[in-house]
Every structure is written in C-alpha cells, then in structure tokens.
Image: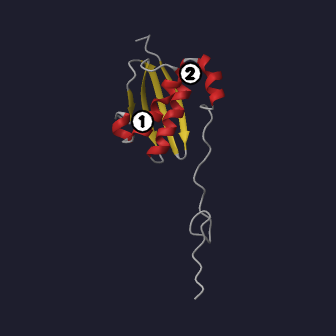
Amino acid sequence: MADFVRFYGTGKRKNAIAKVWITAGDGTITVNGKRPGDYFNRASLEALVQQPFAVTETAGQYSVIAATLGGGISGQAGALRHGIYKALIEANPDLRPTLRKLGFLTRDPRVKESKKYGRKRARRGFQFSKR
C-alpha cells in the first residue's frame, strides 16, 4: 500500500467548491459518487471537466475522485476543472509554468453581486409608476 499516492487540489468558481483527489489510474472521473455525464447532464460541462487532461496530455493516466458543494452545476464544473489543474501541478510541478501562462491556475473572481437595499436586485430598481 506504500505505492498508493494521491494528490489533492481545491478548486473554486462562483459559490462552488470542489475537493479533488487524483491518483495514477485509468482515467475514470467520479463526482459525488457519479460519473460526470450523469452528474452534470451537459456535454459542454463534461468537456470542461476533461479539459485539464487534454491540455496537459495526460488523458487516461490519472483517476479523479471529487466532492463538489455549493453553487450550481456550472460553477461546480468550473470548480472541478480548477481543482484538477491544481492537483495535476502537485503531481507534476513541471506543468506549472505552462498552465500559469495559459491562465488555468487563476481563480475566476466573478461572483454574483449582492442585493442592495431600496432595489429589486443588485442594480435593478423598482418599476416607476407615473400614476
């Protein structure tokens, strides 16, 4: 059991957080106990999750176990992608300069703006009624 090595990465996007563990394996991905196709139900989100392995040319070399929480499925897919990139860097530090240059290590800072008082949403005011 000494050769069993896992690498960890935490990914964040919007209000979602993904805890990601990668091990040397056959390329299977498990998100909250399900396959990505069953969990995300969207081909575009499934492709987003596969992107780190395509960019680093490590498809089929690592197995992924992830736990996502918070946000919606789009934010969770983005958080999972971010977490996989961070875990891959722990597994192979030589990938860091390339991924940094491509911008995959930077957390996307865009989150929903908070609601303001006296308004309907963050910026939308109430409808004006002349009469």
What is the CA distance from the residue labelled 2 to the residue labelled 1?
A: 23 Å
User: Where is residue 80 drawn, in percent x and y?
Assistant: 48, 35
User: Looking at the rendering, in which quadrant would you find the C terminus?
Assistant: bottom right
Q: Nearer the viewer, residue 73 or 16?
A: 73
- Please tell me which residue is depicted at 53% across the width and 21% down the height of the picture: 56
- Residue 26 sits in which quadrant? top left
Q: In this rendering, would 82 be left or right of 43?
A: right
100 up-or-down from 115: above or below: above
- Residue 96 sits in which quadrant? top right
Q: In this rendering, would 40 be left or right of 92?
A: left
User: Where is residue 36 drawn, in percent x and y?
Assistant: 38, 35
| Local crowd size for mark 1, using a 10 Å CA cut-off: few (<14), some (14–19), many (≥20) | some
- Please tell me which residue is depicted at 36% across the width and 42% down the height of the picture: 41
User: Looking at the rendering, in which quadrant would you find the N terminus?
Assistant: top left
**What's the residue type where badge 2 is placed?**
Glu
Residue to which mark 2 is pinned: 90
Instruction: Please tell me whether mark 2 sits on a helix, a strand or a loop.
Output: helix
| Local crowd size for mark 2, using a 10 Å CA cut-off: few (<14), some (14–19), many (≥20) | some
Question: Could you say which disc has been placed on residue 46 in the image?
Answer: 1
124 up-or-down from 21: above or below: below
User: Where is residue 75 drawn, in percent x and y?
Assistant: 50, 44
Q: Earlier in the sequence, mark 2 or mark 1?
A: 1
User: Where is residue 33 drawn, in percent x and y?
Assistant: 35, 34
**What's the residue type where badge 1 is placed?**
Glu
- Residue 3 sits in which quadrant? top left
| Of labels 2 and 1, the one closer to you | 1
